[in-house]
Image (cartoon, grey):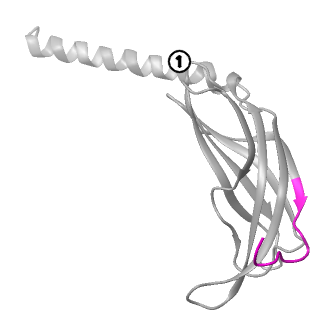
């Protein structure tokens, strides 16, 4: 009964129980924290073009914008935070679809990085492309969102306090702009 293997098994089971308890305590100490922050979004330059799709031959709208972001995420990094995945989301309505969401920009902020984001006059990383011609004159809500990725616990999806609603130009830009 008190063989080497049974003692090793008891030690291993006790170690796993302690590790699970510490992991659960880590989760509980940070679960009820407020993970929201203020963010400032500015849009500097907006154009809308109507482009022909390469193979199909249909025309679709493409919006292109220059934006600036400012936010401080230092309060979100604590002993249970591994990283933040943040993204700029554009949301709008069309006659066919009441909810359209497009990610325009994203960034991964690690624990060792600077926790203040200050993006000035940057262009979107991904295309703001609409399947149709529904972007001219449309109201677009821009919001910064992020996922708090913990060491243990729930993966939080948090919108920023502060969004910006812009209206896209009512006419298409010329081909040269």
Q: What x and y, as percent, mark residue 149? A: 56, 35
**Residue 176 shown in magenta:** yes
- The residue lying furthest to the left in this view is 3
Q: Is residue 61 left or right of residue 114?
A: right
Number of numbered labels in the structure image? 1
SS majority, magenta: loop
Which residue is the site of mark 1? 25
In the rendered image, residue 23, in percent from the top left (x then y), is placed at 47, 22
Q: Is 149 displayed left or right of 50 in the figure?
A: left
Report which quarter residue 18 is drawn in: top left
Along the line of sight, the residue nearer the viewer: 147 or 40: 40
Expressed as whole percent of the image width and height from the top left, the position of residue 42 reads 84, 47
State the image coordinates of residue 79 (x, y, percent, origin top left): 56, 18
Please provide the residue range marked out in magenta. 165-177
175 up-or-down from 90: above or below = below
Point 61% across, 43% down: residue: 107
Magenta stretch containing residue 167, yes or no?
yes
């Amino acid at each position: 009964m008190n063989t080497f293997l049974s003692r090793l098994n008891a030690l291993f089971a006790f170690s796993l129980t302690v590790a699970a308890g510490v992991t659960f305590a880590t989760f509980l100490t940070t679960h009820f924290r407020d993970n929201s922050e203020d963010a400032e979004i500015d849009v500097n330059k907006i154009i809308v073009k109507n482009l022909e799709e390469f193979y199909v031959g249909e025309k679709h709208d493409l919006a292109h914008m220059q934006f600036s972001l400012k936010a401080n995420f230092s309060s979100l990094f604590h002993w249970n935070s591994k990283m933040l995945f943040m993204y700029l989301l554009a949301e709008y309505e069309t006659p066919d679809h009441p909810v359209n969401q497009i990610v325009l920009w994203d960034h991964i902020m690690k624990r060792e990085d600077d926790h203040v984001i200050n993006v000035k006059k940057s262009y979107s990383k991904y295309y703001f492309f609409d399947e149709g011609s529904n972007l001219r004159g449309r109201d677009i809500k821009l919001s910064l969102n992020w996922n708090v990725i913990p060491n243990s616990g729930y993966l939080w999806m948090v919108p920023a306090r502060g969004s910006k609603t812009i209206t896209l130009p009512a006419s298409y830009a010329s081909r040269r702009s």
